[in-house]
Amino acid sequence: MEDDEADETPKGVVMPGRHSADRRIRVARPNSAYFRYEGPGTVRAKREAIAPVRRGEKLSTGLRQLVFGRALATDEEGEERLSKLKALAVFSSDMLSSVAYATEASMFTLLGAGTVAFRLTVPISIVIVAILWIIVISYRQTIRAYPNGGGSYIVAKDNLGTRAGLIAGAALLTDYVLTVSVSVAAGIAAIISAFPGPLAPLRIELCTVAILAVMLVNLRGLRESGTVFAIPTYVFVVATLGLIAVGISRALIGDAPHVTGVVPASVPLESLSILLVMRAFADGCSAITGVEAVSNGVPAFKRPEAPNARLTLTMMGALVAIMFLGISVLAGVVGAVPAADHETVMSQIARATFGTGPLYYLLQFATTGILILAANTSFADFPRLASILARDGFMPSGFAFRGERLAFSTGIVALAFLAIVILVAFGGTVDALIPLYAIGVFTSITLSQAGMVRHWLRVRGLDWRRSAAINGFGTVATAIVTIVFAVAKFALGAWLIILIIPVIVATMMFIHRQYERRRLETRVRPEAIIPPPTRHQRVIVPVTEVTRDVVQAIRFGRTMSEDVTAVHVTDDLARGEELRERFNRQLPGIPLVIVESPYRKLVRPFVRYLEYSARQNRDDLIVVILPEYVARHRWERLLFNENARRIRDELLGHPNILIAQVPFRRHL
Amino acid sequence: MEDDEADETPKGVVMPGRHSADRRIRVARPNSAYFRYEGPGTVRAKREAIAPVRRGEKLSTGLRQLVFGRALATDEEGEERLSKLKALAVFSSDMLSSVAYATEASMFTLLGAGTVAFRLTVPISIVIVAILWIIVISYRQTIRAYPNGGGSYIVAKDNLGTRAGLIAGAALLTDYVLTVSVSVAAGIAAIISAFPGPLAPLRIELCTVAILAVMLVNLRGLRESGTVFAIPTYVFVVATLGLIAVGISRALIGDAPHVTGVVPASVPLESLSILLVMRAFADGCSAITGVEAVSNGVPAFKRPEAPNARLTLTMMGALVAIMFLGISVLAGVVGAVPAADHETVMSQIARATFGTGPLYYLLQFATTGILILAANTSFADFPRLASILARDGFMPSGFAFRGERLAFSTGIVALAFLAIVILVAFGGTVDALIPLYAIGVFTSITLSQAGMVRHWLRVRGLDWRRSAAINGFGTVATAIVTIVFAVAKFALGAWLIILIIPVIVATMMFIHRQYERRRLETRVRPEAIIPPPTRHQRVIVPVTEVTRDVVQAIRFGRTMSEDVTAVHVTDDLARGEELRERFNRQLPGIPLVIVESPYRKLVRPFVRYLEYSARQNRDDLIVVILPEYVARHRWERLLFNENARRIRDELLGHPNILIAQVPFRRHL
């Protein structure tokens, strides 16, 4: 390497005035390929300003944009809104897909008291649909009151306080993760049931691939999600409605289909107790999970957002009510029963009604499709909720940043990671988790409704008495359901959710305290006027050798003060004197103080010396300039000592000492 | 928290002249509890300057000094030198302890051809002793030529080049680690043989505790090592010499002791081939390992170092020769045989000669003791060699720093760690490694001798022809032995050593390249005179809010230049304008440029803007001052973004841009 200092020699003395005169123009009008002039003191970065310049970065950026599409500007967001039809597909898949297993889950519990207990299936389903409608009507009020997105977190926090909001938020975050794991596992299980031979050994791999695929689609952005997911959702809806129509029609004309050749699953027998009915009810309520999605996602709708969202929510409630009740009724008509070979009740009904033909397979594939798409609902909501929590300082700020495609990339990736971890931990079979996430959902719904009651009492406005009554009734109903769940399912896993939610809440409050502390530490009174500095300042530079990083730091210090001193800490006085000789010769005018450190410590004696200097010169500000050679790689930190960092940490917060690290690296 | 800016308001304008006048005196004469005035521009830190000041540090320092003793100043080193008697104990234990197993190792191999092959034990031992003496005489020359410590690394590097030196160094470092593992495992195995019941399940734990104990003693410093280790070494020497004297005497007076009740070990039978003899010879040569220790450790001797070291080496050679030959002869006299129940040959001889009385147990305990102490030899030499390699830039510089007690703490801890890892990996039984480390030893001895031949041919001096002849003969002899080892033991593990040494050498050369690159990057020509800076400089500060860290950075910039500009990058123009309003009000005179970043990236548009500014103002130096809130804990980095670091990394090395990070943290 050539050892020249060309770039450090002066290019001629410059009159300070000349530059100040034309500075403002230069600042405001960069006539450049990268910026557009927007007005005095404002420029707008063009796309070129975020383009990579290094070869390696160009390649990786090119590959990334091939997968995810080009970067989107913030004001391109309008294009990404959802029509009602697409919104229904994106937000309803969680709820609609539960039709595929909710009836069966309820019947499976009832089977414990014998098939005679199945006469309770339809009554239980009617109660569940009633609760569903109470919730739908309640949430219509929420959308009206919170047109910018009224997730349980926001509603509970606004009206019941931070802690209630965080409980709702933690419950929802947990649910979103469980929804992804459970839905994907169930969807993959359905494919495996159809083709058990080749796919059975690949269960976890298939689940992981499915989650990663949904993740990638979501990282690309919202609009594509709507397009990709609309078709399978509507195929499932049409096929299921057709199934119900054909089945009921055949029953009415006296040609009722009948299930044949099914061996009932063997379950532990018990008597038909209240607790059993409560558990069957809780299992059936898995049909209601996902109702939160629409009110959470109001801002993703096309304008006018709130009315579109209300209509979508109502459509969704109606569809689920018809499909869930229809399947429950048909299950009784055809004599379906939870089967020993794990053929689903839904499949039994379809086989009896359609026969094992193309329509049957279409419904099975659509079922698989919508179960995997259900995971997508969480990929829309988890990152959104996380970003709101991050904005409020309860989660790391990275969750609030939007990626190149306007998606909350951190939340999307975190959700995929957590869901995969749970899937792997449970070996790809997560049946036990299905009834669990309903607890979290109902906890957050209850808090949300209670918050809405407070909201109406506080805000009043149009029809507030009616709205308050609706939400009040909703609160009582969902609170009862939540208690029923907790009691009926406590030993079966509810305790886990009841344990995890407080831990998440505590973590979020801890994170909030950190951000709050930083805010207080760095807070400047809004009315304070900060004058130019007038105190005398002494500059001290610790030096080890006459090297470029040291020279740069000393030149830096010289621009700040006439009073620059170099300090050399060493246990070897002879080498210190050699350095002094070289120093005096090469850096004339900079006194060098040698601090002999017989105990070979470098940092502490230097810090003591500075403190001593600071005490001696009470009115002065001591500026410590730390030369710092910056290693190119993290592992190189093992090779180059971190004394600069250690000195910094020791001196930080000392009232009369100001620190500046002057990093050095040279392009080779 | 009170939000006051008291510490930032000016304390009155200060005339620059007043301070400059009396500065030099204040710098040179800190009349303080921490420093002593030593002369103009030089102070010496007192012990108080390294004392901890924070409560938590006081406690940990107190505990540390309780275990390791008070910190020692560099000039207290003289006290820590070794007398000849102590040096013999410290440096010889590796070699002397091998007497406990070398004869048996050789006989075990011979047993393959039947007990009749034992007639070769004494001849082989004589050859080994002859080679030992060739080496001892060779190393006496080395000590004469290298009074400051002539390890194989130094000798080979000085005379044969860096690569030869590194090969010798790598071989030695490997050997030191193996010596610790093998010796401690053998020592613990001896205790366990005596008391198998309670101790057998704790083999690895006992080995680990023993290594940690030796490590602690060494961290305390060299002198204590000598004292602690002298007694068991001399007990072993006296007991072994007594054993040989009694045994030979009884044989001479016709009352030869005889071993009874030993079942020979069962080994695969083979014919008495040359290869078998070679292997038996190689196994016996484990008696020679450790001869390097003295010449490596010359600087640890009391003055005059070289003559004391030569005498110690000769004494050591004589002792090993007598003890090794004596045991080999006695083994034949008493009819000892490697036993099926793993009673050692040494133990058989002692039992036959002394009976199972106090003398027998004394010898057994001393054997165990000296085997563990053998590890200590490595704890003296590994850190010393590592420090030399670190000084030359072939190992991380931390290995060259001496701790509070003047020991090379990093090397000591690294050695203990590696030895424990090997022990755990091999489950505490490392018999297979015993013959391996002889290969490394003989490799380094050969390189060292060859280097000495070059040395004498180059330097000449007193008696150089004689010395060159001795070292030349040594080179040939040890080279032959090394080749015999590699051939005889290749399939039995020698390949592993032959593989590891080049990897270590490559790593050391890689590390050296990193240090060399840094040296070249930061090199300043010794004749260059560096003038005060004269270029106009513009200061640019990236800002996100009006916070204390930002205010501090701007005040900092104002002391450097009249030309300070704040730049705010945002994707939200409205918030940007709010900030501008606040900025203009609170920091009058500092223009704020808003860079709108529609793609939400912060770092890249800022960097592009700076580059643009740098191009526009070719003659100016642009100083970028990065405000940096410093998190208190490492995990907090997850919460606070690292934009300052990313901006720094992007800008480093740009010719007209200088960077300063101004860290901020406030004591709460």
Image: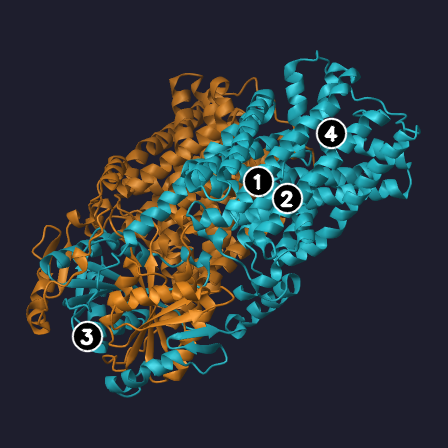
Chain colours: A orange, B cyan
* Residue A102 on image: x %, y %: 50, 37
Q: Which residue is mark 1?
A: B139
* Residue A509 on image: x %, y %: 48, 62
Q: Which residue is mark 2?
A: B313
| Circle 1 SS class | helix
Q: Are marks 4 and 2 on the same chain?
A: yes
How far apart are the alpha carbons under marks 4 and 2?
22 Å
If you read the primary sequence from the N terminus, does the residue marked by circle 3 or circle 4 appear first? 4
How far apart are the alpha carbons under marks 1 and 3?
79 Å
Amino acid type, callout 1: Tyr
| Circle 2 SS class | helix
Instruction: Look at the image and tell me whether residue B626 can be seen.
Output: no
- Residue count near mark 3 (Cα–Cα under 10 Å), binned few <14, some 14–19, many ≥20: some
If you read the primary sequence from the N terminus, does the residue marked by circle 4 or circle 1 appear first? 4
| Circle 3 SS class | helix
In this rendered view, identify the residue nearer to me: A278 or B509: B509
- Residue count near mark 1 (Cα–Cα under 10 Å), binned few <14, some 14–19, many ≥20: many
Q: Are marks 4 and 1 in contact (CB under 8 Å)?
A: no
How far apart are the alpha carbons under marks 3 and 4?
89 Å
Compared to residue A257, the image places residue B65 above or below, namely below
Q: Are marks 2 and 1 in contact (CB under 8 Å)?
A: yes
